[in-house]
Amino acid sequence: MVRHLATVILAAASISLISAPIVSATIAKGNAGGDTVAASHRRLTDALDYDSKNSVDSLSRLLEMKSQTRKLDETKNDCGVLFYYHIPGTKGAALNEWLMKLEDANNAQYISSSDDGSFLEKVEKSLDNEGWTIIHAQDDSLSLHLDESKLEKWRETVTKKQCQFVAITNFADTIDYSVAHTYKKFAQCNCTPEVFKERNYDMDTPFDGQLDYLLFNNGEYDGTLETKDKVKRGMEILQKHFDLVLLNNREQFVDTVLKVTGWPSPGPLAEKAHGSLIFTKDLVSQYNKVAAKNGDGDFVDAVGHVYNSDLAYLVAALMDQ
């Protein structure tokens, strides 16, 4: 068991949350030879410097932030746009494959930044379509820190036609995300597990974090924002532009898409099994350091509290005082 004490500070947004769960990571070999990672819930009272008065203030600010998030109308609509911002390493490939099957089964239009041609140009042309359009945005799509006005314009164009614009993204626990990228590095290494371990799992070249990808896509980050400001900016973009923000919940993704479109499901989500790498306590420690440095530790924690009902644990903790 690896314990990681996290302090979430969104100072620029006047949010200061002391939390601690303590992340981590039971890593064990499964029956099929894969690796599993489990994360515990964060509990406010576990923080070493827990103070009930400050925690009440923090909880109040988090509840206010939660109340300001977009509210998704799940009423069935005959037309609209499903905009899926796919962050690699969050099991989003299976969601995208499912969306493509959904498009085939229901005669919808599908646009992906992974396809040839100008992504932005194709999206602009599709906004006047009848029925539903599925937009899959991944690499070379939108750098939301700079391009959020495009998302705003697309929503305005679609809703003016009395159609629905549904923006969705999903995140993963920082350990699960790191494990996914380690397997990607292992595939690129084209070497044995033993050699990969000797190379320190190629951790000398860290992968981009979920927050960085949300803000800057796969472009270069110039380092002008401090970590706390990146976290604030990420939460701001989610609040302003995304109707559904998920953390380790692909089932809700499927349920919501089927509700708003009224379409039948084309089948279950595909499951991808990991290989047989052995993850050491030192490697998990490196994961936590990377997540602290790139802002994912604080950001994913904030997403969990605001969007994933984790506030219930804070309320319960405070009620016990």
Image (tube, rainbow, N blue to C red):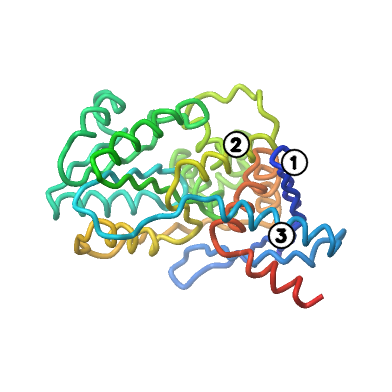
Left or right, 183 with respect to 235, comes to: left
Residue located at (84% from left, 61% from top): 53
Label 2, secondary structure: give it.
helix
Quadrant in the rendering for residue 251:
bottom left
Within-10-Å neighbours for mark 1: few <14, some 14–19, many 20+: few
Residue located at (43% from left, 28% from top): 149
Q: Nearer the viewer, residue 189 or 219?
A: 219
Identity of the amino acid at label 1?
Ala
Residue 11: image tag: 1
| Residue at image mark 3 | 59
| Residue at image mark 2 | 233
Identity of the amino acid at label 3?
Leu
Task: Please tell me which of labels 3 and 1 falls first in the chain.
Answer: 1
Q: 129 above or below 38?
A: above
Do callouts 2 and 3 mark residues in contact (Cβ within 8 Å)? no
What separation in Å lies between label 2 and label 3 (alpha carbons)? 20 Å
Residue located at (63% from left, 54% from top): 64
Label 3, secondary structure: give it.
helix
Q: 150 above or below 194?
A: above
Task: Please tell me which of labels 2 and 3 falls first in the chain.
Answer: 3
Do callouts 1 and 2 mark residues in contact (Cβ within 8 Å)? no
Label 1, secondary structure: give it.
helix
Residue 162 drawn at (x, y percent): 25, 45
Quadrant containing the N terminus in the rendered view: bottom right
Residue located at (66% from left, 69% from top): 313
